[in-house]
Image (tube, grey):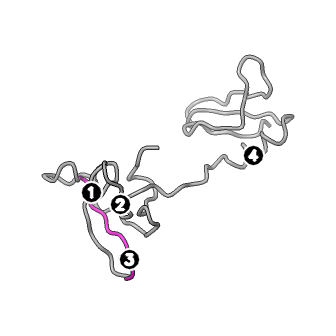
Amino acid sequence: MAFDPTKPVQTRDGRKVRILCTDLKGREPFTIVAAHEGLNSPCETVATFTSEGAILSAAMQSQCDLVNIPQRHVHADLMILAANDTSLRFQYRVGHSHPWKDCIYPDTITPFTPAWHPDHEYRVKE
C-alpha cells in the first residue's frame, strides 16, 4: 500500500507524528515536513521526508520512516456478516451521488465476496 500523508500517520516504530507540510520547495525529494515524538522524550523532532514517507531514502528503511496507521474499514463489520451469513442481501454504491445496486451472494454473474472496495459504500438491503 502506498504511503498517504493525508491519512493517519505514525513512525515505523509507532511514535506519534504531526504532518506540518507536504509541499516543501527546494529540498526535493524531501517534500514532507513532520514533527514526531522523540525516542525517550516528550519533545518533538522536526524532520523532512520523501513523498513515500522515507526519512533517508527508499533504499534504506528507518524506524523514523512515516507509515500510515492501519485503520479498520468502515464496512468491516458488514463484510464479516457477509462471510458468516450468505442469506443476507447487500447493496453497494460508489460515492453518495450514485444509486445503490444490489449485491446478492451467491450470484453466478457477479458474485459478492466478503471483501470491499475502498471507494464503495455497503449496506444491508432494506
Rounded to the nearest angstrom, the CA distance separating label 3 from label 2 is: 13 Å
Label 4 Cα neighbours within 10 Å, binned few <14 / some 14-19 / many ≥20: few
Label 1 Cα neighbours within 10 Å, binned few <14 / some 14-19 / many ≥20: some
Q: Is residue 32 above or below residue 105?
A: below
Residue at image point 34% right, 61% down:
19
* Residue 21's disc number: none
Badge 4 marks a residue whose secondary structure is: helix
Residue at image point 30% right, 48% down:
59
In the picture of the structure, the residue carrying the numbered disc 1 is 56
Badge 1 marks a residue whose secondary structure is: loop
Q: Indicate the amino acid at tag 4.
A: Ile
Q: Indicate the amino acid at tag 3.
A: Leu
* Dots 2, 1 in contact, CB < 8 A: yes
Residue at image point 85% right, 40% down:
85
Asked if residue 87 lies in the magenta stretch, the reply is: no
State which quadrant residue 89 falls in: top right
Rounded to the nearest angstrom, the CA distance separating label 4 from label 3 is: 38 Å
